[in-house]
Image (tube, rainbow, N blue to C red):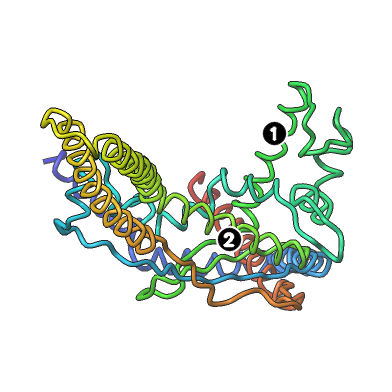
Amino acid sequence: MSTTHHTNEERISSFDEFSPRRILHFGGRLALYLRSKLVWILAFAIILGLIGAAFAYYKKPTYIAEVSFAVDEERSQHNRSEFSEFSEQLGLDPIDGGNVFSSINNIQELLKSRLLIEKTLRSSAMVNGNKLLFADFFLDSLDYRDKWVKKSAYPNIKFNALKKDSNEVWFENGLLTNMYKTITGKYLKVSGKGKATTITAVVCETEHPLFSKYFVEALLAEVAGYYVQSKTERSRNNLDIIEKRTDSVRRAFIQSLYGRAGIADADINLVRESFSVPGEKKQTDVQILRTTYIDLSRKLESARTSLMNNTPTIQLLDRPVLPLDRVKPSVVKQFIMMFLIGAVLAMGFFVAKLFLKSLTR
């Protein structure tokens, strides 16, 4: 009986502890407590707002260079054509070469690959009449030379120098790695333009307008060249092999014609049948080589057509035009946003403090 009575008292106490009256009472205490701390809340919010406003005021503006493009390519048809049968006999596959880049997602990843970004950094551009290497342009225009190079063991490093010791090569590779990570993590954005399209937008947003413009254009040129080369590599290899075989058969065919003519001239006055055998043999060789040469010439034209069909085109839709769009955070908006964040953080701190205090009683 006493055990049952004790259990009922625990249930009543537990119900009373989480009753709506107790919650309302705690809410009232919390409101009074926050009102008493209003000065501290406002002070913290204003300080955080002023910090945000100062950050917006002193932050350098950024400049947006955007290039949008679409890939125009003719899809190969997987049919049993005369050329495909001949290619299989040669052990070749000229159709649908370079399928690894057929997906637009793969092309977008190609734009952010270290290989092509590093190739772009090692290339140069004419900027205000001066030829600048993009790696040097990056360090100087975005103020990274003082941070990464000036106090190093190689303050006058030249990226395209031929003679370098191993330590300088390692330092150069480290610099290029830092540039690649900074560009892909901070400055470069690649995304699809619209949900129902295959148009890709490449945006380079930096503190220097000329670097933004020239770098994104150079990067797209590197990617376009690499993409076309990769897409058509097998077709070009097949075309080269067929061209070599066609030329070889053509030379053999011409030589056989001269050989047949020489035998005919030598045996023109002879009557014995045995003397006609070499001439017949040469005539047979000429016919075989003529047929092979005609067939290879036809296949050669088919290979050229296949290469033309497999060669994609990068269609540029938008190019960055100076002056670029300038982006700078608003001082007022930054103050309001940081003020609200500061107020929420301060109230959260005092709410947690009051809650912990009530638990320790």
Give x and y (percent) for residue 76. 27, 61
Helix, strand or loop under label 2: helix
Please give left or right for residue 258 compared with residue 127 in the image. Answer: left
The answer to which of 56 and 99 lies nearer the viewer is 99
Q: Residue furthest top?
A: 166
Circle count = 2
Please tell me whether residue 354 is drawn above or below residue 89 in the rendered image: below
Residue 79 image-quadrant placement: bottom left
> Which callout, 1 or 2, points at the residue further toward the start of the chain?
1
Name which residue lies at 11% across and 41% down.
Answer: 1
Please indicate, yes or no, whether residue 120 appears anywhere in the rendered image.
yes
Residue found 69% across the figure and 40% down from its top: 176
Residue at which label 1 appears: 174
Q: State the residue in front, 75 or 304.
A: 304
| Location of residue 254 in the rendering, given as x and y in whole percent from the top left corner | 35, 44
At label 1, the amino acid type is Gly
Instruction: Give how far across and how far down residue 284 sits, in percent.
Output: 17, 40
Query: Relative to residue 117, is residue 197 depicted above or below?
Result: below
Q: Please state which of the two labelled residues, at mark 1 or mark 2, is closer to the viewer.
A: 2
Reading the image, the residue beneath label 2 is 220
Q: What amino acid type should be assigned to the residue bearing mark 2?
A: Leu
Give the percent coordinates (x, y) of residue 267: 24, 35
